[in-house]
Image (cartoon, rainbow, N blue to C red):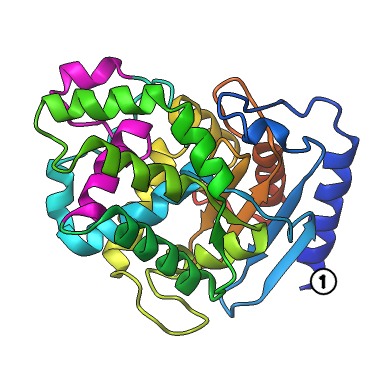
Amino acid sequence: MADLQNVLDEIVQEAAECADRGVVASYIPELAKVDPDQFGIAVALPDGQVVSAGDAGTGFSIQSVSKVFTLTLALGKLGDGLWARVGREPSGNPFNSIVQLEQEKGRPRNPFINAGAIAVADLVLAGHQPREAIGEILRFMRQLADDDSIVIDESVAHSEMAHGDRNASLAHFMKSFGSIDNPVDHVLGVYFHQCAIAMTCRQLARAGLFLAGDGRDPATGAQVVSSARARRINAVMLMCGHYDGSGEFAHRVGLPGKSGVGGGILAIAPGKASIAAWSPGLDPVGNSKLGSAALEQLARRMGWSVFRA
Ligand code: GLN
């Protein structure tokens, strides 16, 4: 894969020369400490090989990228019954917006805005203590990434808990409609810890490989989800994975993708690759600025857009 390695090396070079790197998230104080000059990219291929460049071995807070994996877990528990609790329509609103929740009677528009991910965390929690649910999510990530060294950054989880008033509002508001079953502090505990999982681009790209392989981890042969479910998760990522920047990402990159305010993005090229890009500086809607630009370049140079014949 010398060609791919060359493309990634060039992308890292271009990123290094870019002066406008966006702004690091500061509403979670622990995230504001991250050095904005970092950039990494990793591509996991169907044979399990991971090709990477830049700071692809540096851990970062995966934040909302975790929502793809908790959605996958919750779908495994509830099946399509999950969609009674959370929709699959783009919100067109910021990730932490509350406005549509009243109109939708406590049913979030999709599982990737904060309200939707909190509703999904409630479903993962069903019948468990928060500690067990957090353990289940972490084990799932380790299994998918084939790497037991993945951990939760407790300082990020606590930082978010201490400044999580907006998320607490969303959870209480949903609970007032009867759409959260568990105690709000339990649900938020799970949500904040899933967001605080720290992974490298190499680990994240590897963990997403089942979504590029029709639900099957092509490296191990494990069928993680059915092929129909993998397609649907990818569809929701394409439509909703970048909040009110989802249309822009689909337009520029042409791949299902999920961003997080830690600056990570997971993008899926079905049948071809699972890609993780990371740079902490964000654009005004909270998506990694250089990460999006890098994925645009990579998809273009490799011909990976899902809309390409
Ligand atoms: N943990 C973050 C929050 O709830 C996740 C948001 C994000 O990554 N977009 O605010």
Residue at position x 28%, y 38% from top?
A: 185
Residue 19 is left or right of residue 309, and the answer is: right
**Residue 113 falls in which quadrant of the image?**
top left
Q: Residue at x 77, y 46 (%)?
A: 39
Nearer to us in this view, 301 or 104:
104
Residue topped by disc 1: 2
Q: Is residue 217 above or below residue 196?
A: below
**In terms of image quadrants, where is residue 5?**
bottom right
Which residue lies at the image location 37% right of the left edge and 57% below the top edge?
A: 134
Residue 92: where, in percent of width, then height? Answer: 38, 22
Q: Nearer the viewer, residue 58 or 254?
A: 58
What amino acid does circle 1 point to? Answer: Ala
Task: Look at the image and say whether residue 99 sits in the magenta stretch.
Answer: yes
In the rendered view, tell whether residue 84 sits above or below residue 72.
above
Residue at the image position 58 percent from the left and 54 percent from the top: 198
In the rendered image, the residue lying farthest to the left is 178
Confirm or reject: label 1 Cβ below 8 Å from ligand 1: no
Whether residue 74 appears in magenta in the rendering, the answer is: no
Image position, residue 298 (x, y; %): 70, 51
131 relative position to 76: left or right? right
Does 8 sit above or below residue 210?
Answer: above
Query: Magenta span covers which residues?
Result: 98-126
Residue 161: image location, x then y, percent: 44, 34
Q: Is residue 297 visible?
A: yes
Report whether residue 254 is seen. Answer: no
